[in-house]
């Protein structure tokens, strides 16, 4: 009997064997592709968030900066007399940040904390005071956005309202009412983070809100495909010259100081980045010390002391209130290493008290947003909540 | 070398033949005169037969001399072409970083504004090679490296074309076309030059070892294919981001085989075809070979993303082909030529060939910088068909002619004179080329011979005292050299596509002189290198701010401004 010669080819070369191996190979390939596609974005689009935001608290109670009596008098001057039609949204925004969401006033022309918050977060309330103006809250594909820099019926800065809500402790699950239905603050944060571009014009408030609501070192992935970490944010904030940015660059310094404080609670910065922030703030302080006027104020040229151009947007008093109030505000939350000599703060605070006392009602109305920073700064230096000067900040925070 | 005991009359080339003693006093080898037997002169001389040591393949003809001359000239042209300003310097910076840290960089080392964007050093091996060559011999050797890469690619294409067409004329024509297609980018050295060599190498392997050919292919794949192709693909994946083209090519080869088999025996025949099986396995093996990369799976997983695709960015990003441009005309020309060549061809046109043309055309349509790939592929697809037509024409003309009785001629002698001329030409080309300098000596090339006119040499020198962390704005094609020379970050370099959208938009706005001061402040740009031809509005805008920006250089290639504040600080330090 002769044996049939066996084909030299293996099973793999037979049609069925080949097909079977290809099916297996394609299966493996598909599996790998699926697994790989899950790893495509090593940084989640959104960071882990905390429903209750972290609180940036003042660190010093220095009665020699401002006395209790001076503080009460100043705060009484700065009550939010915003009741009535068409209150400027940036005024409401600033007032809410200063006074908080629980404050109430006896004066009929003052808006309470809940009322101010409602104007910003409830379209029915907004429409009641602003009529047919385009809504403040807009729904978009990434979440909810606050209309900004579009006139008096909009916020004055990108994400200022979100940062305000974070600073006054509004949780992420709090409801927002839009013209087309409800949403939550979480969606506001979500849109802010996803639409954030590192090189956008205003970034200070987004960075602050992110630090308070999402203090995660992992950061998030922006729509531009950029992994935004707090180190990168800090670099961005420090990149520009000191005087550049909103309010003569002071909000950048405030956000840096806030990042340092958040980092103490939830590490979000690398050691190098933290050191760079401290060095940056130290230099800012050195510049402020060298340019302070003997009366105690600073002006728009606080960072170099050079003569100001003749044409200025605000008058002398407004500029000085703005520069001085903001400086005292960020120092109040900054670590001791970056503070100036005590007399620098005292002279600045006392100048603020006297200037606010000297404000006419018209000037108060005109400079209100700047004044809220000044009033809040004075309260912070006494560890007080503006809405109740007798309550320590740390008690209310707890 | 003469091994015989007797001299050969002058005027005859016999250096490469050996002489043997014959029984009769007569030289029988042609080319050596046969002396009359029985004469007095040779009666006392033992007979020798001269036989060649080298085979007849070493006998070259005047046409070979022409080919050598042409290739030598192309090599010299490639050698003496100054280095382009764009591209290579970013690779040198990245390669240096890898060499110094012995690790792959995690972020773009040239463009600090790309921090946080996905950065994958897909072309790490090419960058390390370039940086190592630069460290070894400076710019001079970068030029030599580029010339060698171009020449090696061209030689491989020549071999491919010759194997496919069996025609030196078509080979030369094809190579000239390929060289012409490379011309716009020939001054550029970068991973793409390595990728180009890999493509030529892969096609050569496939053609030489009969894996792919329009005239028919082998069923059983040579062992050299199984080793060579995956190894080459692995190397390609580490050298240049265009390596997916290798897989596309191999897929086309498999489809080509399948379509030819199906045309004869149907689908069942394809399934039973071991030749098809082999090509599919080769494709899959090559796919696995691409994972032999420091990034491993990540090389592919990151490449699945649409925006910020690292492979895409490495090849220059989205740079669409404009059909009404020269490049567009060239692509249209390739399509037309392919169509004409295929139309009159007797050879079978397979699906694989069509797919390859479509795949490369799509790639070029999305990124016109890949045009250098289009012509070789076009030549590859046209060559065999054109050769077939020529052969047909020749045979028709021969049959129409009356057959003439061939005289019963003796076989031609082996004449090595043209081989020696070729060798001489090779030596002359080597001696003339800068690559011979280490061996033969010679003066180093001047700065003008090393760098093309656009390289911002003067601007880089003018910025040499600027702090290393100071950001410089310059047109992206100049940015790489500024980053290399000053070891600093620039706003944008040749990897422009890796920047976030906002930064990219602002880069362009600054270049057009829009919102100049505001944008330069926002990014804290400390110095601006503007091209007078492209950035006139920017130059005018900065001139209007003499208190903020001080011009420190103006030459035909660039105008350099530095922030007055930075200059003042430098003065204080001095």
Image (tube, coloured by chain):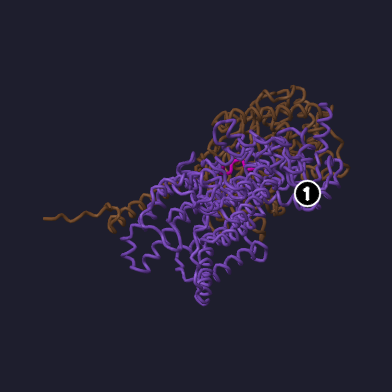
Q: Colour of chain A?
A: brown
Whether residue A77 is situated above or below residue B420 in the rendered picture: above
- Tell me which secondary structure the magenta stretch mostly adopts: loop
Counting from the top left corner in percent of width and height, residue B458 is at 79, 40
Q: Which residues are the magenta region?
A: B111-119
Q: Is residue B23 left or right of residue A112?
A: left
Regarding mark 1 in the picture, which secondary structure is present there?
Answer: loop
| Badge 1 density bin: few <14, some 14–19, many ≥20, Cα 10 Å | many
Q: Quadrant of the N terminus of chain B?
A: top right
Q: Is residue B207 above or below residue B554?
A: below
> Is A52 drawn above or below residue B392 in the view shown?
above
Q: Report the front residue among B342 and B112.
A: B342
Q: Is residue B568 something one can see in this rendering?
A: yes
- Please identify the quadrant where the C terminus of chain B is shown: top right
Tag 1 residue: B531
Residue B218 location, quadrant: bottom left
Q: Which residue does the image show at 49% across and 54% down from the upper left?
A: B203
């Amino acid at each position: 009997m002769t044996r049939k010669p066996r084909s030299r080819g293996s099973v793999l070369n037979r049609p069925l064997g080949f097909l079977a191996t290809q099916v297996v190979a394609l299966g493996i390939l598909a599996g790998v592709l699926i697994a790989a596609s899950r790893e495509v974005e090593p940084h989640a689009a959104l960071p882990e968030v905390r429903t209750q935001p972290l609180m940036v608290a003042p660190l010093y109670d220095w009665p020699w900066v401002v006395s209790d009596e001076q503080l009460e008098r100043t705060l009484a001057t700065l009550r939010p007399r915003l009741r009535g039609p068409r209150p400027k949204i940036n005024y409401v925004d600033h007032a809410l940040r200063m006074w908080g969401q629980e404050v109430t006033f006896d004066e009929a022309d003052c808006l309470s904390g809940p009322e101010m918050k409602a104007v910003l977060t409830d379209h029915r309330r907004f429409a009641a005071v602003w009529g047919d103006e385009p809504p403040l809250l807009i729904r978009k594909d990434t979440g909810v956005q606050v209309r900004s820099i579009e006139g008096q019926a909009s916020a004055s800065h990108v994400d200022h309202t979100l940062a305000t809500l974070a600073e006054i402790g509004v949780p992420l699950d709090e409801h927002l009412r839009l013209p087309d239905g409800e949403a939550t603050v979480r969606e506001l944060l979500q849109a802010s983070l996803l639409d954030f571009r590192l090189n956008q014009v205003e970034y200070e408030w987004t960075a602050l809100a992110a630090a308070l609501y999402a203090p995660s070192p992992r950061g998030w992935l922006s729509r531009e495909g950029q992994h935004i970490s707090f180190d990168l944010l800090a670099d961005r904030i420090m990149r520009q010259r000191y005087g550049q940015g909103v309010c003569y660059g002071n909000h950048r310094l405030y956000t840096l100081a806030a990042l340092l404080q958040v980092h103490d609670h939830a590490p979000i910065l690398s050691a190098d980045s933290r050191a760079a922030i401290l060095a940056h703030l130290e230099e800012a302080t050195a510049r402020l010390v060298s340019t302070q006027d003997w009366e105690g104020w600073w002006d728009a040229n606080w960072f170099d002391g050079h003569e100001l151009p003749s044409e200025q947007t605000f008058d002398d008093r407004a500029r000085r209130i703005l520069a001085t109030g903001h400086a005292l505000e960020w120092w109040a939350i900054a670590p001791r290493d970056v503070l100036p000599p005590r007399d620098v703060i005292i002279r600045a605070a006392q100048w603020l008290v006297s200037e606010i006392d000297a404000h006419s009602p018209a000037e108060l109305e005109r400079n209100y947003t700047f004044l809220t920073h000044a009033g809040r700064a004075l309260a912070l230096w006494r560890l007080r909540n503006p809405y109740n000067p007798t309550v320590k900040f740390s008690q209310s925070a707890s | 070398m003469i091994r015989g005991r007797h001299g050969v009359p002058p005027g005859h080339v016999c250096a490469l033949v050996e002489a043997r003693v014959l029984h009769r006093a007569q030289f029988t080898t042609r080319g050596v005169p046969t002396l009359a037997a029985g004469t007095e002169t040779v009666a006392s001389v033992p007979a020798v037969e001269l036989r060649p040591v080298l085979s007849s393949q070493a006998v070259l003809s005047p046409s070979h001399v022409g080919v050598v001359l042409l290739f030598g000239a192309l090599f010299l042209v490639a050698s003496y072409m100054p280095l382009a300003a764009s591209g290579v310097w970013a690779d040198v910076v990245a390669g240096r970083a890898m060499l110094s840290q012995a690790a792959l960089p995690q972020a773009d080392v040239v463009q600090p504004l790309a921090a946080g964007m996905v950065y994958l050093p897909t072309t790490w091996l090419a960058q390390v090679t370039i940086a190592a060559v630069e460290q070894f011999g400076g710019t001079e050797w970068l030029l030599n490296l580029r010339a060698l890469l171009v020449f090696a690619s061209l030689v491989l294409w020549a071999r491919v074309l010759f194997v496919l067409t069996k025609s030196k004329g078509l080979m030369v024509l094809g190579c000239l076309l390929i060289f012409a297609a490379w011309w716009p980018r020939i001054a550029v050295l970068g991973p793409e030059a390595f990728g180009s060599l890999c493509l030529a190498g892969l096609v050569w392997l496939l053609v030489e070892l009969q894996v792919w050919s329009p005239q028919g292919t082998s069923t059983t794949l040579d062992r050299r294919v199984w080793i060579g192709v995956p190894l080459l693909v692995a190397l390609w994946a580490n050298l240049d981001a265009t390596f997916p083209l290798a897989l596309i090519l191999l897929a086309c080869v498999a489809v080509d085989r399948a379509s030819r088999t199906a045309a004869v025996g149907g689908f069942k025949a394809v399934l039973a075809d071991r030749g098809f099986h082999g090509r599919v396995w080769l494709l899959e093996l090559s796919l696995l070979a691409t994972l032999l990369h420091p990034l491993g799976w990540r090389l592919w997983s990151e490449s699945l993303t649409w925006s910020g695709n690292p492979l895409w960015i490495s090849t220059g990003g989205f740079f669409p082909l404009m059909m009404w441009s020269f490049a567009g005309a060239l692509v249209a020309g390739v399509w037309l030529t392919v169509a004409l060549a295929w139309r009159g061809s007797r050879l079978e046109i397979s699906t694989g060939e069509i797919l390859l043309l479509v795949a490369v055309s799509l790639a070029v349509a999305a990124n016109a910088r890949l045009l250098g790939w289009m012509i070789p592929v076009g030549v590859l697809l046209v060559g065999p068909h054109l050769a077939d037509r020529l052969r047909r024409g020749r045979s028709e003309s021969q049959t129409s002619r009356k057959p003439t009785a061939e005289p019963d001629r003796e076989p031609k002698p082996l004449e090595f004179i043209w081989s020696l001329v070729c060798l001489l030409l090779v030596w002359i080309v080597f001696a003339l080329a800068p690559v011979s300098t280490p061996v033969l000596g010679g003066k180093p090339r001047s700065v003008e011979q090393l760098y093309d006119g656009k390289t911002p040499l003067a601007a880089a020198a003018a910025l040499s005292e600027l702090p290393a962390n100071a950001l410089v704005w310059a047109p992206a094609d100049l940015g790489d050299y500024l980053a290399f020379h000053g070891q600093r970050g620039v706003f944008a370099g040749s990897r422009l596509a890796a920047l976030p959208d906002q930064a990219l938009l602002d880069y362009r706005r600054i270049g057009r002189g829009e919102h100049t001061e505001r944008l330069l402040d926002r990014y804290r740009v400390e110095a601006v290198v503007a091209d007078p031809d492209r950035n006139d509005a920017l130059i005018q805008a900065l001139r209007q701010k003499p208190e903020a920006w001080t011009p420190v250089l103006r030459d035909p290639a660039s105008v350099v401004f530095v922030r007055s504040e930075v200059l003042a600080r430098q003065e204080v330090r001095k």
